[in-house]
Every structure is written in C-alpha cells, then in structure tokens.
Image: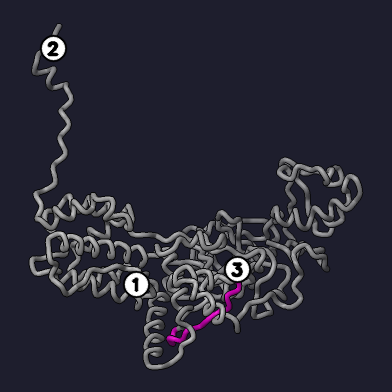
Amino acid sequence: MQAAPDAAAARAPAPAEAAAPPPEAAPVVASIRTKLADASFRKDASADDIAVLQAFYNERSDPLWMTDMGFSREALAAIDEVMKADDWGLSSADFVLPPAGDLPASVDAAAASEIKLDLAILKYARYARGGRVDPTKLSKLIGQSPSLRNPKTVLSEIASAEAPDAYLRSLHPKHEQFQRLHQALLAARAETAAGGKPQNIQRLLINMERWRWMPEDLGALHLWLNIPEFMVHVVKDGKEIYAEKIVVGQMSYATPIFTAELQSVVFNPEWTVPPTIIRENLLPSLRSGGFFGSNTAILDQHELKVNYNGKRVDPSSIDWNHVNLGAISFVQAPGPNNVLGKVKFVYPNPYSVYMHDTIRPGLFDPAVRAEGHNCPRVANPGKIAAVILAADKGMPQAEVDKLLADGYNSAVNVEHHIPVHTTYFTAVVDDQGKVQTFGDVYKLDAMVGAAILGKGAQSEAVADNAQAKAKPGAGTTAPGAAGASGGIADSTP
C-alpha cells in the first residue's frame, strides 16, 4: 500500500540549509577578505591566526579598528599597549604594527593596517602566555607546556572589551611572583636609563618567561620545589606554611622540571631499584663472580631481594651475564637501611620521579645540594608529611608519628587537588621587593636567554651566574663508584 503523500513527506529528511552568505561588507572589510585569501599576503603569518581572521571577518560587515578618520580610540590604545611589550619582558620588535597617526591613503591600505594590527594582537596574546618558544624543545629537562589562549577567543574578547589595552595586560601571568618580577624589571630599566648598571635584567627576563610556562592555577594547596634554591615550600591559599631543604639530582642525573598531582604519602616505603642503578651499580658487581656471575654480596649488603617475572627467586640461581633485565626487579624492604628512608611522596609523572627521605642526612649540610640521581630528597620528611596531611585531611601529628614508628609499609592517599610544581627559578623577589638570585645549577639560564633574547644574551646570562656557579658538594661519590655503601646509597634516585 502506497503511503499518503503527506505522510511520506513527513518522513523525508529536510533539505540541508544552505550556508548563509557573509553579510554585505563595508569596502574595508571586503578588502580584508580579499587580502586574507591571498597566499602571498599571508605567507609570513600564522596559519591559525589567518584562519581565525577569515572566519571573524566573514561574520561581520564593519571593520574592528578602522573608522572613516583612521584608527579608532580603542585601536590606538591597543597599539600603544603592544608598543610597551618590553615593560612586560617581551620585545616590542617582535610585533609588526601599522602606523598609528596617519590616515590610510586608500581602502586597501586601511584593510592592510587592520590586518596588521589583528596579527600583532594575536601574536602578543600568544607570547604573553608563553608561546614565544616551546620550552620542551629547549631541554629534555623541561616538561612544562604553556596554556595558550585560543586565538578565536582572544579576537572575540578584545573586540568586546571596553579597554583593549587593559585586556592585553590581563593576558600576562597573574601570579604574584611574576608581578613582582615585572616591577623589578621596570625598576632595573629605570636605573639603566638613569645611568646605572643593574646586573639582573636578563635574569629577570628569563625568569618572567618561565612564569609564562606555569599553570594559571597553582592550586590552593601545593608543593613548590625550586631546584636552584634547593628548597621545597608548602603553600596554602597563597601563603607559605612550611619550607624545607632538598637535595636535587646532580648535572648528569638532573631533576626534571614539571607539574604533577600528589597522590599519596608512603610511610616506610619499599624501594624498587631503577633501571639506571641496576645497569650502572648492580650488574657490574653481580657479573664479577665468574662465568655465571654469582657474586651476590652486593645484594646482601643492601638487603635487596630479587623478583623474576614477579616471583621471588634465589639470586645465585640466575646467570647474570645473560639475564633478561626486563623480567628482573630488585626490591629493598622497609627498614633502617632503606635508601628512601621513612617517607616517600608519590606524584605520578612521565619521569618516575618522586620526593623522598634519605639515610644520608649529611647531604643537607652544604649550601649547594645537587648530588645523586634525579629524585629530590627532603630533610625532615615526617614533618613535611604531617604538614601536608594536616592541611589536606586534618590528620593529627600523633597519627603521622605512629605511622612512622610502626615500621610497616603504608600509603595515605590525599583527598584534595595538591599539585607538585618542580620548578627552575634562578630569581625571585622577596616581600621587601629585593631580587634574590640562585645559581644556575643545570646551566639552563643561558639556553632560555638565547632562545627568547637572541644568542647575544648567552654570554651575559653566563656571566650573571659565574659567581653563583653550582657544584656538587665536597665528598660526592660519583654514580657507580664504590664507597662505604658500595655506590648504591650514593646513587639513589
């Protein structure tokens, strides 16, 4: 039976609506559309920026910045702010701006000026949030990725902003330390203009750039490990509630720079020996016992047990010269000789790095504390654990003391969002407005300076750090070298 025409029509899909044509454009906007479609015009611009501008001007009929009398008041304010980029640690030379005072000679000239200002604004927004360089390409130690503002959002927001200059300023990091460094930079530049010779301008610029790579929200409760300072700070609601010394990795086993989430605090931890220490410390000793490599004294010395495919085995039964290392793990039980000490702070990350106690308290005596492998070691771990767990879940000190004393391996999961920021700031500004500087222990200042300021900045950055050059403390045992501990405790992660 054939369906009634009306019923069949009701079931038929509605025809697709044709895309609405762009609104009829003013001559300047029509010229803008033409120029944005011209490959030769856009060859030096970001493809993403061009695509955003094409969509933006296809949806409007009037220019954003141009009037019959030239640039609008808002446009002039935006131009003036971009020209002040140097005050914010950027370089005004990076932004190609149209002439602000002259009335464009033609519609095409007005269109070109509008596009030029748009592109400068989008680039400024990107640079303000850390898009000047990709920090992960500067060094394998840097695991920070800037949070860039979507260019479509930038264009939409500045188009509706009452004060475009204030909007551009708002794109810079709002962290208190960034703002303090900004003020220190202005003061240093003023001193230079007055004939003085401030020493820290490049270091201020380098550290302002590092702030652009940080998360916008550091966390109401967070841990702040600053590698060049050799300190960890516990911060709650913007105020430091505890600080403690740390030891970071030496140059060849440097501590990486990244942000992760604290998951748990482990009391009386087990230690699973990392692959680098297996290769460099354990295997040479295990393979020194003849054809079957049965010299397992180093395992007894450090109370290490051996697992093969997850099962406990007798180490003397293994041919250490031909063993499949992927199937082997070495585990040290909790106890007074465990190289992780009494506490481990777990924050999962791609580097398998965590902060922990140590059985070598003398490591905290030197002013410069870069030694061993890449996991940071912390003084007074029980105290910092108590501070964190009290702030997180109200755990009393007595309960922490009991967990420490009973000797059992136990983990306490945190309840709240607690970021752990492992950072690399060689300059901070204290509460009195004084710039405090730290040695460039991993030689990263010159690298960052060359990337953002040009290669000419490298020598000055190195000179700035010459007097504070960080070296491992006296008595450091090189990784794998024998000593009272056989090289294992000296090479802990």
Quarter assignment of residue 298: bottom right
**Separation (CA) of disc 2 from disc 3:** 81 Å
Quarter assignment of residue 176: bottom left
Q: Earlier in the sequence, mark 3 or mark 1?
A: 1
Q: Earlier in the sequence, mark 1 or mark 2?
A: 2
Q: Position of residue 400 (x, y in %)?
A: 60, 65
Provide the secondary structure element on which disc 1 rests. Answer: helix
Q: Is residue 332 left or right of residue 125?
A: right
Are the residues at dot 2 and dot 3 in contact (C-beta closer than 8 Å)?
Answer: no
Residue beneath label 3, please? Answer: 398
The answer to if 198 sits in the magenta stretch is: no
Residue beneath label 1, please? Answer: 93
**Separation (CA) of disc 3 from disc 1:** 59 Å
Using the rendered image of the protein, determine whether residue 417 is visible from the camera's viewpoint: no
Question: Would you call the spot at circle 3 few (<14 residues within 10 Å), some (14-19), or many (20 or more)?
Answer: few
Q: Which residues are magenta?
A: 431-442
Quarter assignment of residue 29: bottom left
Quarter of the image where the N terminus is located: top left
Please name the residue shown 82% across and 63% down the image.
Answer: 486
Q: Position of residue 168 (x, y in %)?
A: 28, 69
Q: Is residue 322 left or right of residue 276?
A: right
Residue type, label 1: Ala
- In this view, the residue in front, 378 or 82, is 82
Residue beneath label 2, please? Answer: 3
- In this view, the residue in front, 440 or 330, is 440
Question: Would you call the spot at circle 2 few (<14 residues within 10 Å), some (14-19), or many (20 or more)?
Answer: few
Q: Position of residue 252 (x, y in %)?
A: 67, 65
Question: Would you call the spot at circle 1 few (<14 residues within 10 Å), some (14-19), or many (20 or more)?
Answer: few
**Separation (CA) of disc 1 from disc 2:** 72 Å
Q: Which circle, 1 or 2, is nearer the viewer? A: 1
Q: Is residue 386 left or right of residue 408?
A: left
Magenta: main secondary structure equals: loop
